[in-house]
Image: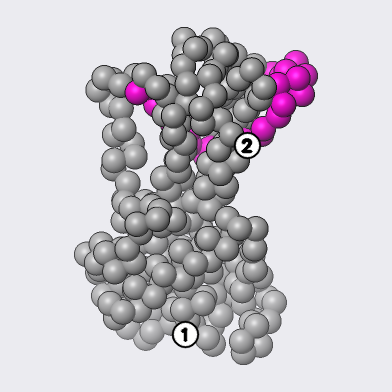
Amino acid sequence: MPEGDSIRRVANRLAPLVGQTIVRATTQGLVRNIDGRTVTHVDAHGKHLAIDLDDATQIRVHQGMNGRFYTFTRADGEARLARTSPGRASLVLATATDLFLWQTCPTVEIVPRRAPLRGVAIAQLGPDVLAGDFDSRQAAERAAIHASRMIADVLLDQRVVAGLGNIWKTESLFVCRIDPRTRVANIPKHTLVQVYETARELMQRSVDGVRDFGAYTRTGKPCSRCGASITAYQLGDPPRWTWSCPTCQPRPAHDR
């Protein structure tokens, strides 16, 4: 599933859409009545993308595991659509000059200003780890409430902090030398702060195009710090593959 850094890149690529007027909008090939509306704002919150229009309608997209996003000139986009099954085109936004296409996304909502559930999905999330006002100390306090849970589970909980997924859960814990199975109660508060600061830094680097993995998907490969073999195992419900260094990230005896 695309994580917060990927959705932030989508929001950045949509910057040219702000100020443009939508001339056609479709979901699953069905025309939606928002033509003539102007895009006023585009933002990401965690794994959700929000596009605001000048009549306060909001478009929300969650790409899920398999969603993809493409930008085209209008002519190239129309040619691409002619070769695409309407059922795969989750959302199409066309302006006079550009065409923006989302494919195979599980969630696309176009919600008017006064709709009862407008904004609810995003309001239920924790603070966005890549937001300009993100506070790692506040994030650590939110995480500390879940003292009995494994840190790996808490980092993936979008109600605590939004945007982190399996990649950056694995990588931030590797950098901070914490075993993913460690209970939050056994992690000092200042270390929790460091985990969220590290996750934010790694994800911002990814937004900028830099991705270097120390543990993620490196099963059996040597740790860059100590040379031990990176191990892989499944954690959580549903289970997700997780990677760590058994030497640099020793599992505490009381968490075994």
Is residue 48 something one can see in this rendering? yes
Residue 122 within the magenta-colored segment of the rendering = no
Q: Which residues are magenta?
A: 56-85
- In the displayed structure, 158 sits above or below 92; it is below
Indicate the quadrant where residue 73 lies: top right
- In the displayed structure, 165 sits above or below 30; it is below
Mark number, residue 68:
2
Residue nearest the viewer, comparing 104 with 47: 47
- Residue at point 46%, 64% (across, down): 200
Indicate the quadrant where residue 109 lies: top left
Residue nearest the viewer, comparing 136 with 55: 55
Judged left or right of residue 21, residue 220 is right
> Residue 141 at what x, y percent from top left?
24, 67
Judged left or right of residue 125, residue 43 is right
Residue 72 within the magenta-colored segment of the rendering = yes
Helix, strand, or loop for circle 2? strand
Helix, strand, or loop for circle 1? loop
Q: Pointer 1: what residue?
A: 250
Query: Furthest-bottom residue in view?
Result: 226
